Amino acid sequence: MLQPIPVTLTGGDTNAVRAPLLFVALSSGAPLPSALQALDTALNGAVTSALESRDFRGGKDEVLYLTGGGAARRVALIGTGAAPLTPVAVRRAAAIAARNAIRLGTGAVAFAVSEWTDSLIEAAVLGIQLGAWQYLETKTLPPENERRAPLTSAELVAPQSEANGKALDTGLSIAAGQWLARTLGMMPGNLCTPDFLADTARELATRHGMKFTSLDRAGLERESMGSFLSVAQGTPQEPRLVAMEYSGGKPGDAPVVFVGKGLCFDTGGISIKPAQGMEWMKFDMCGAAGVIGAMEAIGRLKLSINVVGVFGATTNMPSGTAVKPGDVVRASSGKFIEIINTDAEGRLVLADLLVYVRRFKPAAVLDAATLTGAAVIALGHTATGVLGTDQNVVSAVLAAGEKAGERCWQLPLWDDYKDLIKSDVADIKNSGGRPAGTITAAMFLKEFADEYPWAHLDIAGTAYSESDLGWLPKGPTGIPVGTFVEFARARVAQ
């Protein structure tokens, strides 16, 4: 598995950068910053000329290559748009810089902005890693004479100080979690199995000194998890429930709990999905990948808080033993569930997980799942849907998502919607049909999350992209790692 590339701070003099490629981020309409005057002089006024002639206007994602200047072999300007430099804009620009370095085969890249803050350094590190990430494990390398040099290092043209160094380390820690989550998400379903996810979590927990628990099918049966088991009954693969307990806070302090849906592949079961596009259903485990990635980041950050990461992993397959529409199963809470649609399986897994985490007496529980296509219809691929029972927790999730650059939007969870999931033969049914599909799915989960403050993140539209976004390649985005980590960091600061 490829690892994140090293990033260093090299001081604030752009004219002294020795990297083969230097990217300089500039806002639209902004004058040439004084910090770039020396570089402009080394380029014989090329930067000033490009700005004055409007050959470069600083539009979002705009790139203009210049000749070499100072010690750098090549200099490029990258636009961040009309707004002042923000962490989100810098992260995006740094990602594009890294992707361009990979395309050109420069081997290394440097990145500069007009003025650094600790939040911008953190964002730049995250952006470089987002752009540098690739999944090459199942690709044959081209002939040696056709290969481009891989990107092996990056540097930020920023002053070397204690605060900047801490921001650099923070960015690298979060980036490591996102990198891991994206790699797990991109893996084919025959490689990223429930056992593989469990083994990855076990290695992580051991490395960071976390308590690790894993339940197989027999363990789920002992816990009376009939809801989770109903999804797993159509596959010969062992389902896995995994818990990682990080104890960075005071003993006895109530932990924050992150819960993730880990459907390593979702065919829809007996309610089978259309063949076209079904290959994307390997991404149905991105909630679990987000939990694993967040725990990796939190372990590296050594946050002073107790955190538990839990996920349930299985595959949803049609077979002679698969659950059928109309079947009734019993969750570990004792509630009976009528299964209307076997493709509404993620909530069946999460139901038992949300009951399981009661034992941790949590201060707050956040779950993340690629749960409903309705979330994509409502919010597109721009925002994660958030619903919950505690407005303070929901508001904290929204703030965490904003800080992480993983925007979220709250949807209502009014009792009026509960009628849509009433069953004639059971306590509740697992699908309320097409109207308000994201809300009724959360309403279903609410039935099992009634003993603690809780928020649900529907990441169906944001966990992966079916097209190249320019600053991110097609595939997994790393969401919700950033949101989870920022939620935990904010509680440490309280």
Image (cartoon, helix red, strand yellow):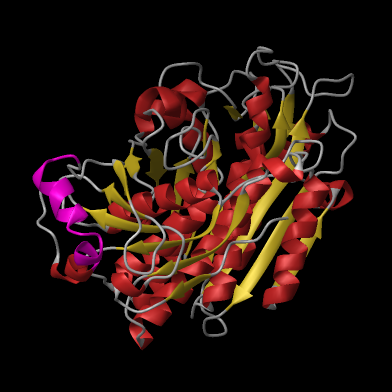
Residue 424 locus on image (x, y percent):
59, 18
Q: Is residue 298 above or below residue 366?
A: below
Q: Main secondary structure of the magenta part?
A: helix
Farthest bottom residue in view: 162
Depth check, front residue: 148 or 171: 148
Residue occupying the point 41% across, 40% down = 384
Residue 258 visible: no
Depth check, front residue: 103 or 269: 103
Is 52 in the magenta?
Answer: yes
Q: Is residue 470 above or below residue 70?
A: above
Would you say 251 lies left or right of 410 here? right
The part of the image, by quadrant, that contains residue 409 is top left
The stretch in magenta equals: 39-55
Residue occupying the point 32% across, 68% down = 70
Would you say 49 lies left or right of 126 here? left
Q: Is residue 363 above or below residue 127?
A: below
